[in-house]
Image (cartoon, coloured by chain):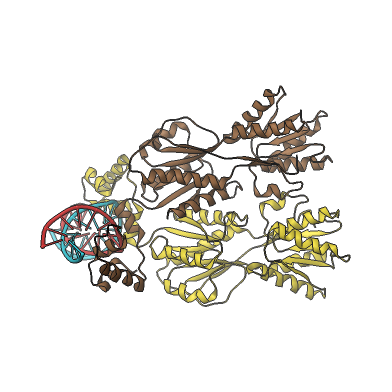
Chain colours: A yellow, B brown, C red, D cyan
Amino acid sequence: MVTQKDVARMAGVSQPTVSLALKGNEGSVLPRATVNRVMSAVETLGYKPNRLAQALRTNQTNTIACLIPDITNPFYPSFVRGVQSAAEAYAYDVITVNTEGSRSRELHYLELALQGRVDGFVGSFFGISDQDIQTVEQMEVPIVRLEPSHKKIDSFWLDDVFVDNFSAMKKLTQFLINKGHIKIAIISGRGGPQNVRLSGYKAAMTGENLEPRMHIVDKFTEFDGYNASKAILKVSTHPTAIIAANDLMAIGVMRAINEANLRIPEDIAVAGFDNIPASQLVYPTLTTVERYQDRLGNLAVNLLMARLKSKEKFPRQVAEGDYKIIERNST
Amino acid sequence: MVTQKDVARMAGVSQPTVSLALKGNEGSVLPRATVNRVMSAVETLGYKPNRLAQALRTNQTNTIACLIPDITNPFYPSFVRGVQSAAEAYAYDVITVNTEGSRSRELHYLELALQGRVDGFVGSFFGISDQDIQTVEQMEVPIVRLEPSHKKIDSFWLDDVFVDNFSAMKKLTQFLINKGHIKIAIISGRGGPQNVRLSGYKAAMTGENLEPRMHIVDKFTEFDGYNASKAILKVSTHPTAIIAANDLMAIGVMRAINEANLRIPEDIAVAGFDNIPASQLVYPTLTTVERYQDRLGNLAVNLLMARLKSKEKFPRQVAEGDYKIIERNST
DNA sequence: TTGTAGGCGTTATCAG
DNA sequence: CTGATAACGCCTACAA
């Protein structure tokens, strides 16, 4: 490994001088000539700074961790992508970790910071509830969470980015109502973002004096959507539109409708949530809600960097991301 | 940050003794009592070893980099997952990087090793051609590539894992032939794995004295599959089966067939390659080839670890992964 | 303008 | 059995 010492020897200067020359101070205390000599030595030797040593000395690793429940869940890769590209712009590395959404694993990975491995966190913390905030506060590590809604808490370390799932689902429901649908059912789970979406649906329906038809499921796969719709379609007064709280379930809904020999959207309209890649590959293509996860990733990193670059604590930041109803052929 | 010094003070020993106690030598030179005192101090103080400092000292970071072209490409997440879970078992961290498949970015990220940030690499190197091997050799960093076929080269640092794309596609084609198809077309690109698959198709067809019908495309999206099939379907003697070199294109093929008011599989059978999540969400579900990417990820990490754990160089390793024809409703 | 000295937290090699 | 001591590569005073 080529070190500053090697460079120093070659340039005929001392090692600290090399260090100085490399950081290229604009007010440069060093004379041009010296800097040039050092630089050409760096060049010919192929010196690369050892970032571990830098980190040990400066106490910052230029690395952040990105925690997500599961990289194979189609919602996350583009968030990760957004995080990585933003981080790269700041010359930061990203360690991506699958937490399985479990609290213990989330807490476990937060220890990466205590081991001096990362400077901060970005990601989706399902497990860490508001009562863990104390723990987090005393770790004194900046964290930016990806949340389903605006949470009001006090903290000097926990920032949030969020998309307003409530109004997104409210708007999606309203969109169907405006299309003339009266009997609109929803299939949704109770956890995390899905619960918030459920409320949005309810708000839209009751706001128009329509009766909410809610079908609660435990898990959120295509299969769960399929099963739930089977039940829904059995009833003779079945709805003319079904909303699923995510695209995977919506695709299951579509299959059930197909098998019942009903047409989409003529007999029953279907809408989903998330705009996963598959949503435009199914037939008919699925109306859904885009959350611009890549931008959320960017946003999250920007908030994190604001903290990392600032020497002083400052109160919690919350940034809202865009969403958009994507109208396709299923409605 | 709690350091060994703090622990030492609390346990009434010197700092190096703490270091000794922690690594729990089985032949333990240290008396039980001392170890216990140290351990309880570790416990109460919540000491976590600073891995940067360890890395600086030992010259190994316990981190590997996973290079892939694009995390949003549905093929990769489960490979990454496999890599991460295997690495975790070895107590290694994984830094995942998107290279865009560009040679310059791949070479750039290989510098992570020179910066002392990672111990080795795993992933898909599209850009690094065989002529870069010299460069790689003199970096003296272990790399395990995910390759589309068995490549015979000499190296002490480059290992490969691969799935035999040639025989997989040959088998898939044979599968269709056995179903009675005579006129079977393929839509494929020329690059990387697709080229190998193309050869497999050709081998199967000529082996049965059937005329290959090859449609070469430049890119490999759903849209490209759609366009290519439009052309194919125009001809009156159109094939009774279409193979696409990946699932995304196959799904495009299915759409084109739908729009031509033909039935799948009665009029035309369709098969893809990769078993991406969407392939079982489309209607009808798509017959395709599973490559068990998660296992490949595991395998790759295992090969890498063999090198990292061994103090001596040894000749190149090549490991073959499984594949399987997944028969679904499109054939 | 440059070099010397000290230290970041750890491990390894010695004496004692 | 244990405690100094040095070293990993780098950065930051401060002194020359």
Which quadrant of the figure has residue A246? Answer: bottom right
Quarter containing the N terminus of chain B: bottom left
Q: Give residue B104's position: percent from left, percent from top.
A: 47, 40
Give the left or right position of residue D6, taking residue A57 as reference.
left
The residue at the point 55 percent across, 53 percent down is: A81
Q: Is residue B264 above or below residue A249?
A: above
Visible in this render: residue B190?
A: no
Q: Say whether residue A158 is left or right of residue B263.
A: left
Q: Nearer the viewer, residue A98 or B290?
A: B290
Q: Position of residue B201 (x, y in %)?
A: 66, 30
Instruction: State the residue in front, A211 or B197.
Output: B197
Residue at (36% x, 59% y) in the render: B51
User: Image quarter for residue B109?
Assistant: top left
Q: Residue B207 location, x and y as percent?
A: 67, 23
- Would residue A106 be seen by someone viewing this image from the given angle? yes
Q: Quadrant of the C terminus of chain B?
A: top right
Q: Residue at x 72, y 48 (%)?
A: A281
Q: Position of residue A179 (x, y in %)?
A: 83, 63
Q: Is residue B119 above or below residue A238?
A: above
